[in-house]
Image (cartoon, rainbow, N blue to C red):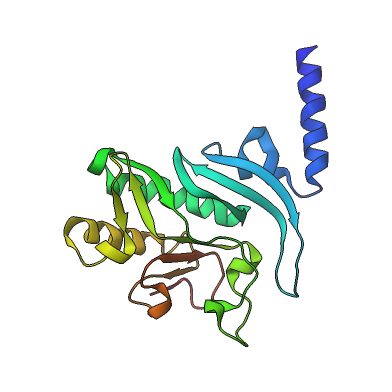
Amino acid sequence: MRRAALALALGVFATSCGRGDTDVSRAGALCGVPGLSGTVSGLVPDPVAGCGVERAVRLEAVHGVRLSQPATLDCPTARSLGQWVRESAQPEVGRLGGGLVGLRVPAHYVCRTRNHQSGARISEHGKGRAIDIAALQLRDGSEISVLDDWDRGQKGRILRRLHRDACGPFGTVLGPESDRFHRDHFHFDTARHRGGPYCR
């Protein structure tokens, strides 16, 4: 009886997600990854042409690391963030400050142009393919801040390795040395470029 009820519940859930959303709901794991925690948002309609997310999720935590605000993303971007946290951020931070417990997220989905510039193309943020990380939050209450620590000692070295390691899981990686718009955060997105990942 329990199995039948569970099968029925999973069937209803999968149907409510829509066709093609099995990667979102399979086995109760967000985007098919047990370490990703959050909820299915489904369609995020486009207020202007070029924006919107067909099958969005609301990501709240990644392999036990909480986001400072839930992030609306598509599944490929959520999975890329999960890979970066698991393979780079957690090992690089190690036991510093008691270990990594959170990511300070200033931006995720928002319908706007690139760098808020008039006449520019729609940002990957407007497609659910981008997330910005301003700091890594540690268990003891301290942070590794992109703005404050990029050029400072051990924390700066960690940030530079994290920036380097994001290049691959993400198609675009921008940091303090890319331009004035990214002096205080990392921009990660899953856009595809002809020459491979674009990392600055």
From the top left corner, tell me how far across and down residue 6 is, in percent. Answer: 76, 22
Nearer to me, 79 or 97: 97
Point out the residue furthest to the left here: 153
Number of numbered discs on residues: 0
Residue furthest to the bottom in view is 119
Rendering coords of residue 39 (x, y %): 65, 42
Pick out the residue farthest to the top: 1
Answer above or below: position of 8 versus 63: above
Q: Is residue 177 above or below residue 79?
A: below
| Left or right position of 1 against 39 | right
Residue at screen point 61% across, 56% down: 73
Q: Residue visible at 48% across and 60% down? A: 106
Q: Could you tell me if residue 32 is visible in this image?
A: no
Q: Is residue 23 left or right of residue 69?
A: right
- When asked about the image quadrant of residue 43, the answer is bottom right
Residue located at (81% from left, 41% from top): 16
Q: Quadrant of residue 17?
A: top right
Q: Is residue 123 visible?
A: yes
Q: Quadrant of the N terminus?
A: top right
Residue at the image point whose x is 25% and y is 42% from the top: 97
Determine whether 65 is above or below 193 in the image: above
The answer to which quarter of the image holds residue 153 is bottom left
Q: On the rendered image, what quadrant is the C terminus found in?
A: bottom left
**Spot occupied by residue 100 in the image (x, y as percentages of width and height):** 34, 43
Q: Please give left or right for residue 197 compared with residue 20 in the image.
A: left
Residue 158 percent coordinates (x, y):
26, 56
